[in-house]
Image (spheres, rainbow, N blue to C red):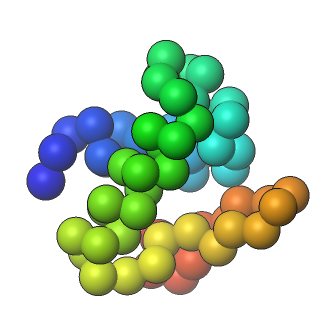
């Protein structure tokens, strides 16, 4: 497992915002999305609930 995936997960868990996470990690928002999707694929679970205004951890997250 890539450490960048874990760093992104931790930061997104704290901010609950993809845009803010991207700014804090100095990457594009699409990179954050791709990393979280990759991490979810690796663990086989959905880690975040997403809608247009909110991001929340799932029980698995």
Is residue 37 in view? Answer: yes
- Please tell me how many numbered marks the rendered image carries: 0
The answer to which image quadrant residue 15 occupies is: top right
Q: Would you say 44 lies left or right of 16 here? A: left
Vertical position of residue 33 compared to residue 25: above or below:
below
Does the image show residue 15? no
Q: Horizontally, is 40 left or right of 4 in the view?
A: right
* Residue 32, percent from left and from top: 48, 42
Residue 49's place in the image compared with 24, above or below, is below
**Residue at horizontal 50 percent and vertical 50 percent from the top:** 33
Give residue 23's quadrant in the image: top right
Q: Position of residue 61 (x, y in %)?
A: 47, 70
Residue extending farthest to the top is 26
Q: Relative to 45, is 54 on the left or the right?
A: right
Residue 25 locus on image (x, y percent):
48, 23
Most distant residue in the left direction: 1
Please report the residue visible at 29 percent of the width from the left and 82 percent of the height from the top. Answer: 44
The residue lying toward the viewer, choosing from 31 and 17, is 31
- At x 36%, y 70%, the residue is 40
Q: Quadrant of residue 21?
A: top right
Q: Indicate the position of residue 60 as horizontal and vertical percent values.
A: 45, 80
Residue at 64% x, 73% y: name it.
Answer: 49
Considering depth in this image, is 37 or 25 the residue closer to the camera?
Answer: 37
**Figure check: 6 above or below 58:** above
């Amino acid at each position: 497992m890539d450490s960048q995936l874990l760093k992104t997960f931790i930061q997104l868990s704290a901010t609950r915002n993809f845009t803010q996470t991207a700014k804090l990690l100095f990457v594009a928002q699409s990179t954050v999305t791709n990393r979280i999707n990759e991490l979810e694929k690796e663990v086989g679970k959905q880690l975040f609930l997403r809608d247009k205004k909110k991001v929340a951890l799932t029980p698995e997250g």
